[in-house]
Image (cartoon, rainbow, N blue to C red):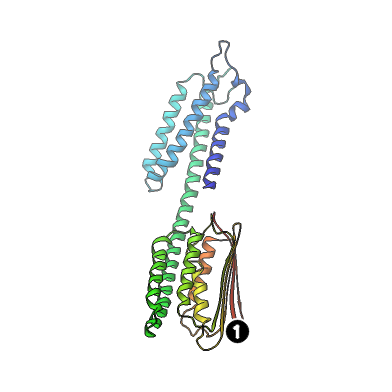
Amino acid sequence: MRSHYRQHIIEVIAWMAFLFFPLILFPTVQSFSADGALNPALKGIIIAHGSLILFYYFNFYYAIPTFYFTKKTGIYSVLIFSFFIALTLVLMSDPGFNPFPSPPFRYPVFTFFLSIFIRFLLVMLVSLGIANIQRLKQIEQEKIQAELSYLKSQINPHFLFNTLNSIYSLTLKKSDAAPESVTKLAAIMRYAISEATGNFVSLEKEINYITAYIDLEKLRLTSKVDLKYSIEGDLTGNEIAPLLFIPLIENAFKFGVSTKDPSQITILVKVVDQKLSLLVSNKKMRTDNGSGTGIGLENVKKRLDLLYAGKHDLKISESDSEFSVTLDLVLHD
């Protein structure tokens, strides 16, 4: 939102400079006649540059997207040429307009046309350049959106598969926790499907989702698992990419839980101002047997590169007995 305000402010300043620059370059046009009437040259400049500003927006918002980007260059050329002729005729009908104001305001016709053409061409090229830059950004953004959607489609089935396995284990044991686990699964899947659809969500909602997931995992843990989960700092007012942490936490439970030997999982979330730190570590209780556990971690890396380029630091530490991930990133406000 702030970037839009800055863009509008810069745009207004640029047009004010374009409109009044000739008045600074040629101070004589700022004078008024003896009866207090507006100097004809000043009036001519306002008409000319005001018309060029209108042409910029006409070209940028209508002609370029409607004809230029759709490869209808013939129609676009005729339209632009017609606008130039119309502008020239309007200025020729105003005896006060002079392309380079200076007494006695009489210049050859060629100079008149050349001045109008140069200004018209400049405005047209600027509008074309900005429109092409924005179009390239839009194409890149659409590409990023498509890739993010693909990454999310990989995360949800992977998470659902592991969670259903946990619920299945509870049902085999005829555990009283099975119905509660189904309720919790329904809540977190509702979040994943309905609320986590954009690039960013409320940090509070995402942490609540993670907490619900951890509560679901707790239902199948035994007393041999030492789980440490804590949240520090103020979560309000910040946003984060949805489902970003869950692959890291999911792997900790997948590889850090044992029903026979003592195991340990640590999940720490700390928020200071707009900076978030996440630590996920687990004691290795089993190793990857080729079941594709690296998919979640790779997804996290790709999404971080797409959404937090230059604003994150991901560190992975692994030993024979422990695996840990530390992530620091700058949150969106």
Most distant residue in the bottom direction: 260
Residue 11: x, y in percent?
A: 53, 39
- Percent x, y of residue 192: 42, 65
Quadrant position of residue 308: bottom right
Asked if 305 appears above or below 252 in the picture, the reply is: above
**Mark 1 residue element:** loop
Observer able to see residue 23: yes
- Image quadrant in which you'd find residue 185: bottom left
- Write down the quadrant of residue 66 in the picture: top left
Instruction: Tell me if I can see residue 113 in this picture.
Output: no
Left or right: 153 with respect to 13? left
> Three-letter amino acid code at disc 1?
Ser
Residues 250 and 95: in front is: 250
- Relative to 44, say whether 317 is above or below: below
Quadrant of the rendering where the C terminus is positioned: bottom right
Left-right relation of 222 to 170: right
Residue at the image position 58 percent from the left and 16 percent from the top: 32
Q: Is residue 28 above or below residue 259?
A: above
Disc 1 designates what residue?
Answer: 321
